[in-house]
Image (cartoon, helix red, strand yellow):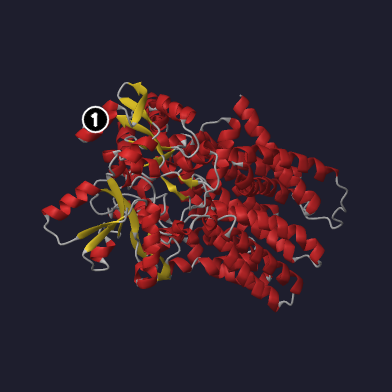
Amino acid sequence: MISFFILLTYLLITSIFGFLILKKVLKITSLVLLVPLSVTLGTGSFIFLLQSLSFLLTPRTAAVSILIIQFAASIVISLLKTNENKEKEPDISKKQLTVLVIYASIICFFTYLGIYRYGTFDRTAHLPMATSIFQNNIYPPMDPYRPDYVLLYHYGGDLLAGAINYLSGANISTSYELVSSLFSGITFLSFISLGWILSKNFYLSFIGGFCAYFSGGLLWLDAILRYITKNFPSGETDWGFLQTFLNLGIHGSIINPPSVMTFTSTSSLGNPMLIFCLIIFYLMTLKTRFKETMPFILVLFITLFSLYMTTDWLYVTFWAGAVLFSLFILSRKNKQALVATIILLVLSAISCKTLANPLFMQDAVQNLGRTNIFALGIKKDLFTVVSWGRLATHIMNYTTINCFSWDFLCEFGLSLILIPFAIIYLIREKNVFSMLLFFCIITTMPLPVIIDFKLNPVELVRLFAFGNTMLVLLITLGINHILKTFFQSKILTTLYLIFLCLSPILQLTTAVIFTPDAFTNREYVRRLCISLRATKSLSDFKFVFKNINDLALSKKDSIFWSYKNEMDFLKKNCKERDVVISSLYEVPAFVGVYSIIPPGKLIYWDQLYSPSSKVFNTAFNTLDPYLVSELNIKWILIDNDSKQFLSKEVLEILQKQDLLKLAYSKQNIEIYRIEDLTKLINTAQRKTAWLLINSVGQTIETSVLNQNRISLFPTKTSSLIYLNNLYSTYPDLKKQLITAQPVSIEQIENQIKSANLAIALDKKF
């Protein structure tokens, strides 16, 4: 109850703050705009201030301080006497607003029913990010899986969920779920706002916003055709209709609608923030005096910063559309709007390059030893996209789709077929705001078929999503403009909604009934269909549903319940920057304590840090005091099953306990605390050293530089400094992923000796 009260207090303070800024400062009076935009601005300003003040006050202090600041600012703003907007804005009625709120509440409720048994997408990455920031209470946040590196990620959504977790005491999973559920409704209302600005017609705004929110393709039709023709993915021969439809009829591989993107931790915030920025940006360009545009620039600056921190590809979408729109402004000789746009974009670029990117504050070696995430190029196979594996054996198996194929068309469906309606609408209406939305479409949707993203090609398909929703909105308005009686017919309107929105609506309702696993996990769908076929009565179905529900909940929180005592111990006893090396990598990671884990346990781990990572194995299998001290390892967690793989030497260290002390022991898990290593380092012989290797694990001196020697370094930093010096002599090295890895000195000496290699070891210590 206390957690709920604190959470409600947070929501009220941030929303009222956003409402007062919009109404009293920006003088927006329309309720159809104020309701969704207030929540978005309040949350965006909270993320902006939290990121900014955490550098000075630490995250915990900043989170509390910001609520106090927003509360005090709300009181001050409410007392200000401002000139009311003399022009009466067109607005919806209170009855119509009630209808919208009811629909938004239903969407929030459905989203929560779907996500509370599922958690957030990529939870093994996001939950450690959120908890580590507030558990360690340091800034800038360090990579929770690589404590020697600063975190490079758009972690604004994780920052928010972590703050809610800290302020309210709610479970970290619950924090994500509540944010996603709330912003599912806010996203829906935001799309309605777009339709309202364009049409000033409630019914048309509702139809357009509804279709944009549930914008789907012809996946349902594709699934029906494949079932009839028995054209299943390779290796599948006996799918029933339900299994075919769940696997192929509701979940896309290229785009997914906003209605289910709220299941992910960042997109739930990104869409409403981008819509907010587009609306406020448009209203700014209508002002005729620079004094009037200044508040708009400030509000946009703050929200764009938070947009970059949560969904950087949507930040790119705004930038691309705004730059092209500025040329449009120039053609209309609106110098005031052009100057304001340039100021906004310059300030935003500077802040995102500095304050939003803590790497600039770090040592130069932070740039080394991991992949350049901004490596782009032109595709060899133009007009193809790498997408998630809808037709593959698993959804996470990437596939390449040709843009002129049926598979591509069925993803976008009517939005590609009905483009002429959008074009005609733009030409005839000459609506300035619709041009801004159109520029966002044409500057982003073509990019994934032309540009190649070296790190992870599938990520570029994200640039399709928002443009497609805007295309659907413009098409809907275009149909109403050209076929004026179309939406007056209930039959035609219903058919339009079915063709366009059937798959996304079924996707949301399926998530409510079976959890999102029902459209992301093929094996889960197979077992589900077997269970459903065996049901012969309502009581059987209730039994199956209960088992599905219990299984989903137990799976989602299994880590927290299975290792609750160990996690509570670490959370209570670990200090800031303490590192835990653990045979059960989930335990320290999910409690927010820095951990060193084997490769392959985190999204993009292999691409960022090399699949040949040896940090965990070397540290765990040697417990070399030099390496343990360098990595700041203060705790060792080990289960009995893992002990059998340890060397005799390490087992003796655990028994002697001159390096560490047993601090926790229960059932088959032990936690050791590392003692002061000063004396041991001064007397013990070094067991490990660092060397530089390429992406396939070869030493760069023997494989790339063709030298008959291998340099061994005492620390990771010294090895990266050496790499930095090599760049001036061998610039081609910059094109490769070169990482520093610790190795056992004795092991590498034995390998060279047994292979009879004429390679010298250059020990730089």
Image quarter in which the N terminus is found: top right
The picture places residue 106, in percent across and down from the top left corner, at 58, 39
Place of residue 657 in the rendered image (x, y in percent of width and height, measured from the top left): 31, 27
Residue 568 image offset from top left, x and y in percent? 45, 27
- Residue under circle 1? 652
The image quadrant that residue 383 belongs to is bottom left
- Counting from the top left corner in percent of width and height, residue 613 is at 31, 50
User: Can you say whether 317 is above or below 98 in the image?
Assistant: below
The amino acid on which the numbered mark 1 sits, given as a three-letter code, is Glu
Q: Can residue 645 be seen from the camera position used here?
A: no
Dot 1: element: helix
Residue in the image at 77% along x and 42% along y = 74
Residue at x 29%, y 35% (from the top left corner): 530
- Depth check, front residue: 498 or 547: 547
How packed mark 1 is, by other alpha carbons closer than 10 Å (few <14, some 14-19, many 20 or more), is: few
397 or 108: nearer the eye?
Answer: 397
Residue 16 placement, left or right of 57: right
Please state if 402 lies on the left or on the right of 86 as rendered. left
